Image: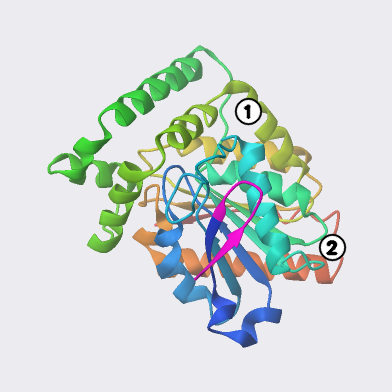
Amino acid sequence: MSYFSGSRCRMFYTDTAENRPESKDKPAVLFVNGWAISSRYWQPLLEQLAPDYRCVTYDQSGTGKTVIEPDHKPSFTIDGFAKEAAELIEHLGLNKEKNLHIIGHSMGGMVATELSLCFSDSLLSSTILACGIFEENAFTSLGLTFLGGLIDFSMQFRNLFQVEPMKTLFIKRAATGEIDKQYGDIIVEDFTTSDKDATNAVGHFSIDREVLRTYTRHVIDIASPVLCCVGMKDHTIPPEGTVTLYHTRKKTASSPTRLVQFMNLGHLPMLEDTRRFAEELKKHFEFAADFHKNNRKGETGNTITQID
């Protein structure tokens, strides 16, 4: 566990190479967090991946242990979050040629997409988890408006989620399957103590139509294999959006797209079924490594996997 002083903040991060020096030259995996949550929720997954990969997590501005200097207020935008992550990538030397897997969860999927384009020469694969797109029509516009109102309400009364029964309801909305109490407590603590300006900004730009249009275009432009992964009982973000993202990308993207649907999981597959989620990630990483090693450009390799 360390700190890195970047242009936006004093960033807290973890790097498994600190305790496993032998992993420093292994392929790296960067984890990009979702909305209003610190990097702590990746820990069970790190335990599954660390023997074979160099795993790096970090707290974005406004969350966890990362410190925003009192005299500096960074911009809470996709570009801003991508910039601070890019500085960490370069600081740790993760930008070696074809050495990096990037995983983005929820809002972090948008940040991961920008990083995937920025570090295209280093990128082995991208994984977009529970961060979909939606056809623009009256129904989805109404849904986005409702979600914006829900964000405003949640922020206005977020301290209520620290007490029962609101705490349990908050956790159940995030995780359909059972998760360890330790991580349920972390999710609630992170949400209720995150920087209010950052949390408000992230919540609203995540449903901004122009931001979503840019995200769609940029996901298609990723030149390495992309895994779209979703829990089909996600009550936080409609899972159909990730399915739509898969079908949209596979039509025109120059590299393979794979879709994994966990039919009975929610918004947090990394906590609800860590072992099986790790297995699917490893399959994707191995597929991507083979794709680049054998220069299989032009091959689609598009697949759909459903897991009960």
Q: Which residue is mark 1?
A: 211
Vertical position of residue 19 compared to residue 84: above or below: below
Vertical position of residue 99 compared to residue 201: above or below: below
**Secondary structure of the residue carrying numbered label 2:** loop
Q: Position of residue 5 (x, y in %)?
A: 61, 58
Residue at the spot 51% in from the left edge and 46% down from the top edge:
68
Q: Position of residue 246 (x, y in %)?
A: 62, 42
Specify whether residue 74 is in view.
yes
Q: Residue furthest left?
A: 164
Q: Position of residue 18 (x, y in %)?
A: 56, 80
Residue at the spot 64% in from the left edge and 58% down from the top edge:
102
Q: Amino acid at mark 1?
A: Val
Q: Amino acid at mark 2?
A: Arg
Quadrant of the rendering where the C terminus is positioned? bottom left
Eye-nearest disc, 1 or 2: 1
The magenta segment: 1-10
Vertical position of residue 103 compared to residue 8: above or below: below
Is 4 one of the magenta-colored residues?
yes
Say which mark, if any, is on residue 296: 2
